[in-house]
Image (tube, rainbow, N blue to C red):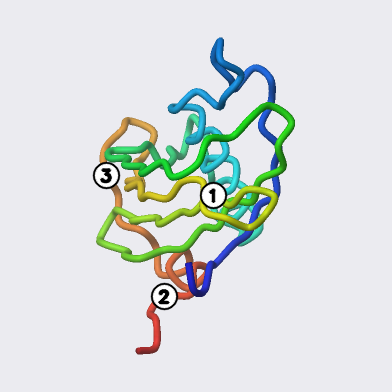
Amino acid sequence: MKAPLHRHASEVAFADTDASGWLHFPNIFRHVEAAEHELLKSRGILVFDRTQGGWPRVKVACDYQRPLQAGERIEVLLAVSRIGGSSITWDFEILNAAGATAAFGCMITVRVDATGRPQRISDAERAALGYPWNP
């Protein structure tokens, strides 16, 4: 990833692994979500509130390149590739301790109100994420 918007250091927990000792495939998204929440909070953007809503995932995809083991240090790189009316497309890359790509992918989240209905991403939220981008 050329210019990540955010970097998040993490470690693969034993609880993230399967019987082989390798990171169980869906648990990669726990690390991506932690990076996303850290970024949103750092930019003053709501993550979740029962009275205001949040950002549920509507699509996720991941390509796995290298296995990761319990105790291994990783870094999550996070970028925004698209902001729609109510959705954000996030690109992510997971690097192992040697800096090699272990996994990469994308996820789409939708800004919803407390009832779960999509709501427009505010101009302030867009600006906090660096939108509009300069080509």
Q: Residue furthest bottom?
A: 135
C-alpha gap between disc 3 and disc 2: 19 Å
The front one of 70 and 88 is 70
The spot of residue 41 in percent (x, y) is: 63, 52
Q: Which numbered disc covers residue 131?
A: 2
Q: Which numbered disc covers residue 118?
A: 3
Q: Residue at x 63, y 49 (%)?
A: 38
The spot of residue 28 in percent (x, y) is: 50, 35
The front one of 3 and 121 is 3
The spot of residue 9 in percent (x, y) is: 70, 49
Q: Secondary structure at mark 1?
A: strand
C-alpha gap between disc 1 and disc 3: 29 Å
The residue under label 1 is 94
For marks 1 and 3 on the same chain, the one whose residue lies earlier in the sequence: 1
For marks 3 and 2 on the same chain, the one whose residue lies earlier in the sequence: 3
Q: Quadrant of residue 81?
A: bottom left
Residue kind at label 1, given as amino acid type: Ile
Left or right for 88, reference 117: right
Say whether marks 2 and 1 touch (CB < 8 Å): no
C-alpha gap between disc 2 and disc 1: 24 Å
